């Protein structure tokens, strides 16, 4: 090796060391690959209302928090499954993520149709008063521990199901309900997908755990990853990210909400 080549090698090594110490670049400095979050087929999820001949929805996000709400930036892609060409055996991996909960664990969906009711905050004042009347609940099979807070029973076991879901009711709690309108046509937007940190929590497991997870929800002992968090995703303070779309045109810009 010539002296010039030795000097060049030392310079390259110094540059590599400096870059390593600096850590990976932030997305503002270098584009970060979007990560797959969900892939939904119309054949499995009839509730989807894709545009045109599309029958496949792919949801991706950037695994970094973005202003102004400090959450991953989402992207929706409506496609025709028949026209999907070469498929990557391994999706692009981030050089680093802003938070481990922004890198989903690969898993297979098992869609299940359920009936849920609105969050109590979405009900009229008259119906909320009815929920607060314990006498109306005593004729049903309701745990007496809810006697002082009957509305809590409704919100836990009947109102807005927890977990990942297509459509459904918003999981209010961080804020009071408020309507969201399309930035293009001003039509009221509707929930498309809820990206949840947990499939159920505590007592919710008795009512909302998927059929395949009922046994796991009934026990406090488990090995490995928690059965109520199969995706490993955590948004907000173990909250939910709900994606809204325009019902008049799914191709209009979507929006999202952390609750």
Image: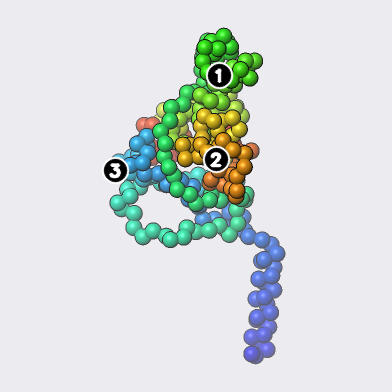
Tag 1: Cα neighbours inside 10 Å, few (<14), some, or many (≥20)? few
Q: Spatial distance from mark 2 to mark 1, Cα to Cα?
A: 23 Å
Q: Earlier in the sequence, mark 3 or mark 1?
A: 3
Of the pair 121 and 254, the residue shown nearer to us: 121
Q: Which quadrant of the figure contains the C terminus?
A: top right
**Total number of numbered labels?**
3
Of the pair 213 and 256, the residue shown nearer to us: 213
Q: Which label was assigned to residue 216? A: 2
Q: Examine the rendered structure and indicate whether residue 202 appears above or below residue 235.
A: above
Q: Is residue 114 visible?
A: yes
* Mark nearer the viewer, 3 or 1: 1
Q: Is residue 257 visible?
A: no
Mark 1 lies on residue: 142
Residue at the spot x=46%, y=60% of the render?
Answer: 90
Of the pair 46 and 58, the residue shown nearer to us: 46
CB-based contact (under 8 Å), mark 3 and mark 1: no
Q: Secondary structure at mark 1?
A: loop
Residue 10, percent from left and from top: 69, 79
Q: Earlier in the sequence, mark 2 or mark 3?
A: 3
Left or right, 84 with respect to 99, comes to left
Tag 2: Cα neighbours inside 10 Å, few (<14), some, or many (≥20)? some
Q: Spatial distance from mark 2 to mark 3, Cα to Cα?
A: 39 Å
CB-based contact (under 8 Å), mark 2 and mark 1: no
Residue 50, percent from left and from top: 35, 39
Q: Secondary structure at mark 2?
A: helix
Q: Which label was assigned to residue 184? A: none
Q: Which label was assigned to residue 53? A: 3
Q: Earlier in the sequence, mark 2 or mark 1?
A: 1
Q: Spatial distance from mark 3 to mark 1, Cα to Cα?
A: 46 Å
Left or right, 190 with respect to 174, comes to left
Q: Which quadrant of the figure contains the N terminus?
A: bottom right
Residue at the spot x=42%, y=47% of the render?
Answer: 39
């Amino acid at each position: 090796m010539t002296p010039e080549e030795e000097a060049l090698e030392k310079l390259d090594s110094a540059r590599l060391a400096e870059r390593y110490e600096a850590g990976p670049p932030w997305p503002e400095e270098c584009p970060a690959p979007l990560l797959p979050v969900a892939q939904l087929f119309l054949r499995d999820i009839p509730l989807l209302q894709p545009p045109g001949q599309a029958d496949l929805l792919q949801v991706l996000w950037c695994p970094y928090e973005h202003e102004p709400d400090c959450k991953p930036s989402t992207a929706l892609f409506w496609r025709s499954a028949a026209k999907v060409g070469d498929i990557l055996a391994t999706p692009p991996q981030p050089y680093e993520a802003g938070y481990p909960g922004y890198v989903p664990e690969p898993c297979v969906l098992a869609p299940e149709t359920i009936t849920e009711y609105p969050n109590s905050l979405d009900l009229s004042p008259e119906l909320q008063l009815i929920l607060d009347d314990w006498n109306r609940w005593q004729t049903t099979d309701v745990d007496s521990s809810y006697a002082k807070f009957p509305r809590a029973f409704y919100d836990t076991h009947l109102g807005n199901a927890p977990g990942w879901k297509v459509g459904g009711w918003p999981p209010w709690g961080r804020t009071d309900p408020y309507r969201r309108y399309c930035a293009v046509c001003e039509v009221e937007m509707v929930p498309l997908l809820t990206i949840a940190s947990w499939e159920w929590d505590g007592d919710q497991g008795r009512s909302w755990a998927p059929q395949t997870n009922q046994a796991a929800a009934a026990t406090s002992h488990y090995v490995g990853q928690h059965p109520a968090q199969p995706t490993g995703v955590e948004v907000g303070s173990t909250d939910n990210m709900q994606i809204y779309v325009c019902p008049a045109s799914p191709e209009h810009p979507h929006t999202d909400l952390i609750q």
